[in-house]
Image (cartoon, rainbow, N blue to C red):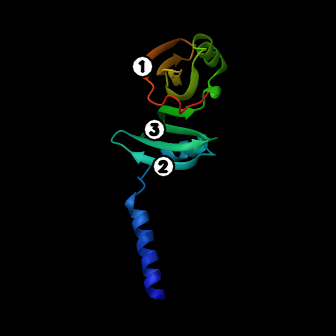
Amino acid sequence: MKKTIITAIAVVFTVICFANPLPAVNERVLKNFKATFKAAEEVKWAEHESHYSVSFTLSSIQTRVNYDKEGNILSSSRSYAPALLPLHVYNAVTKRFGGKTLFGVTEVADDKNVLYVIKMYDDKKWYTLHADAEGNTEVTDKYQRADIGLLKK
C-alpha cells in the first residue's frame, strides 16, 4: 500500500512537471528580467520564434513584458485600477467623461509610445477609451450593457 501511494505521488509530480515545460530562456534575458523586476511573483515564461514573453504580478499589477533574444525589452502591458493612471491622464479622462464609471486600465508601451486602454461604463453602455501619455482621449468602442443592474456605482 505504501509503495502504491509513493508511486502515485511520483506519477502526479512527473505529470505536473512535464505537462507545462518551462521554455529555455537564455541567460541574458533572465539576468535583465531579474535585475529589473526583483519583486516579480507568479512568473510565467513563453518562448516565441523571435522573442520571449513573461507574465507576472508586481505590486498587485498584472504585467507582461516581451524581450528580444538579446534581453532588450520590446514592449510591455500592465493591467490595473484606474486610480493608478498618471494624474494628468486620470484628470483628463474624469473631466471629459465625468458621468461614467472607470472600470479598468491596460497600459501598453513600447520604446516610443504609451497607450492607456480604459474601460468605463454608464447606465446603458460600456466604452473603450484610448488615451495617450499627454491625456488626449478617443472613444474607440461602445457596447450596450447586458449587465444592467449587476454593477453598482
Percent across and percent down for residue 136 are 54, 11
Under tag 3, what secondary structure?
strand
- For the residue carrying disc 2, how many other residues have a C-alpha within 10 Å: few (<14), some (14-19), or many (20+)? few
Q: Marks 2/1: CA distance?
A: 31 Å
Between 46 and 125, the one nearer to me in the picture: 125
Please report the residue visible at 43 percent of the width from the left and 55 percent of the height from the top: 22
Q: Is residue 67 above or below residue 92?
A: below
* Relative vertical location of residue 121 with respect to residue 39 in this rendering, above or below: above
Q: Nearer the viewer, mark 2 or mark 1?
A: 1
Q: Amino acid at mark 3?
A: Tyr
Closest to the camera, between mark 3 and mark 1, is: 1
User: Counting other residues with Cα less than 10 Å from the Cα at mark 1, is it few (<14), some (14-19), or many (20 or more)?
Assistant: few
Disc 1 designates what residue?
A: 141
Going by the picture, which residue comes out furthest to the front? 149
Residue 19 screen position, x and y as percent: 38, 61
Quarter placement of the C terminus: top right
Tell me the residue that label 3 is attached to.
67
Callout 1 amino acid: Asp
